Image (tube, rainbow, N blue to C red):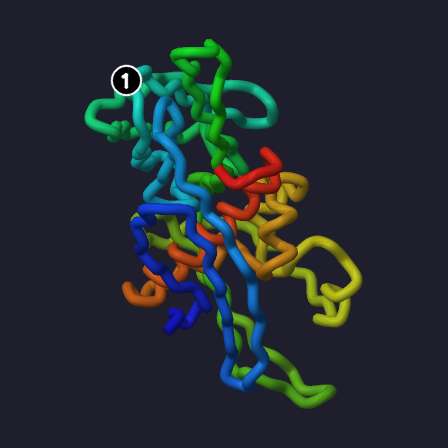
């Protein structure tokens, strides 16, 4: 059974080459089937990279886990707009390595995490890539609420705005308002409710995400169960972006 976000996790440890037949069915009875093949080989120097989340807050930490054979260290680069902003290495012992990466307040938007190590036999690099989104830090919080959910043509809508600081105290400011028909969103690529992230999202990197789901970083859930389901969904969506980035599963 999936969460309300439509995501589910199945843990499985393969001992041989495995073929999965996955079928998903919604409440109306519509279904889709996909065959997934997962070969199992010798570990050698191969490795996998795992992150605790796909979407982070600026100024928080990213938990990185490396799984694989060999003893060579795994190097980690954080790339923003084609520029490397951070480089470090992760030691691997007994098939596992962990590293906590602190995201400075200056890092935000769509970011690539590239992990690589050199094969002990060939000397060639092996690379794994993950795409993540870092929400920019903001000192202001704007909340808007309407007096009704729906209006008849010609009715007057009452909009209440509240501008506060991160501490919840009222702040002075000026707000610009624009009203549009929702039909406009069907003929443009930009998604509603994403004003803050408009300049930090890279559509080319996140295109596989938007093709699957109308994802937005601007509406975090306050319910713990829903937030957990949202985090799982984001990890699944962003893994698709990572696959498309390197052209294969990693």
Placement of the N terminus among the 4 image quadrants: bottom left
The structure residue drawn at horizontal position 50% and vertical position 47%, both measured from the top left corner, is 238
- Residue 240 on image: x %, y %: 54, 48
Q: Residue 44 versus residue 65: which sits nearer the camera?
A: 44
- Residue 107 on image: x %, y %: 46, 30
Q: Is residue 3 left or right of residue 122?
A: left
The structure residue drawn at horizontal position 35% and vertical position 34%, both measured from the top left corner, is 59
- Residue with the most extreme right position: 187
Residue 230 vertical position relative to residue 89 in the rendered view, above or below: below
Residue 129 vertical position relative to residue 165 in the rendered view, above or below: above
- Residue with the most extreme left position: 94
Residue 179 vertical position relative to residue 66 in the rendered view, above or below: below
Residue 93 vertical position relative to residue 211 in the rendered view, above or below: above
Residue where numbered disc 1 is placed: 71
The structure residue drawn at horizontal position 52% and vertical position 37%, both measured from the top left corner, is 109
The crowding category of the residue bearing disc 1, from other C-alpha atoms within 10 Å (few below 14, some 14 to 19, many at least 20), is some
């Amino acid at each position: 059974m999936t969460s309300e976000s439509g995501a589910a996790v199945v843990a499985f440890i393969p001992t041989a080459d495995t073929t999965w037949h996955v079928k998903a069915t919604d409440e109306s009875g519509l279904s889709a089937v996909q065959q997934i093949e997962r070969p199992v080989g010798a570990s050698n120097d191969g490795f996998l990279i795992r992150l605790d989340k796909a979407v982070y807050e600026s100024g928080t930490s990213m938990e990185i886990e490396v799984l694989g054979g060999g003893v060579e260290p795994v190097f980690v680069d954080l790339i923003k707009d084609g520029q490397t902003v951070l480089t470090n290495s992760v030691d691997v012992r007994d098939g596992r390595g962990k590293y906590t990466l602190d995201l400075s307040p200056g890092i935000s938007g769509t970011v690539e995490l590239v992990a690589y190590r050199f094969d002990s036999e060939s000397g060639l690099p092996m690379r794994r890539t993950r795409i993540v989104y870092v929400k920019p830090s903001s000192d202001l919080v704007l909340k808007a609420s309407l007096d009704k959910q729906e209006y008849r043509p010609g009715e007057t809508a009452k909009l209440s705005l509240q501008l506060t600081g991160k501490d919840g105290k009222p702040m002075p400011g000026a707000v610009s308002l624009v009203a549009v028909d929702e039909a406009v969103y069907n003929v443009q690529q930009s998604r509603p409710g994403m004003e803050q992230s408009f300049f930090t999202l890279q559509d080319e990197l996140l295109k596989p995400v938007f093709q699957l789901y109308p994802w937005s970083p601007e509406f975090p859930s306050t319910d713990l169960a829903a937030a957990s389901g949202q985090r799982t969904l984001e990890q699944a969506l962003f893994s698709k972006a990572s696959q498309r980035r390197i052209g294969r599963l990693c």
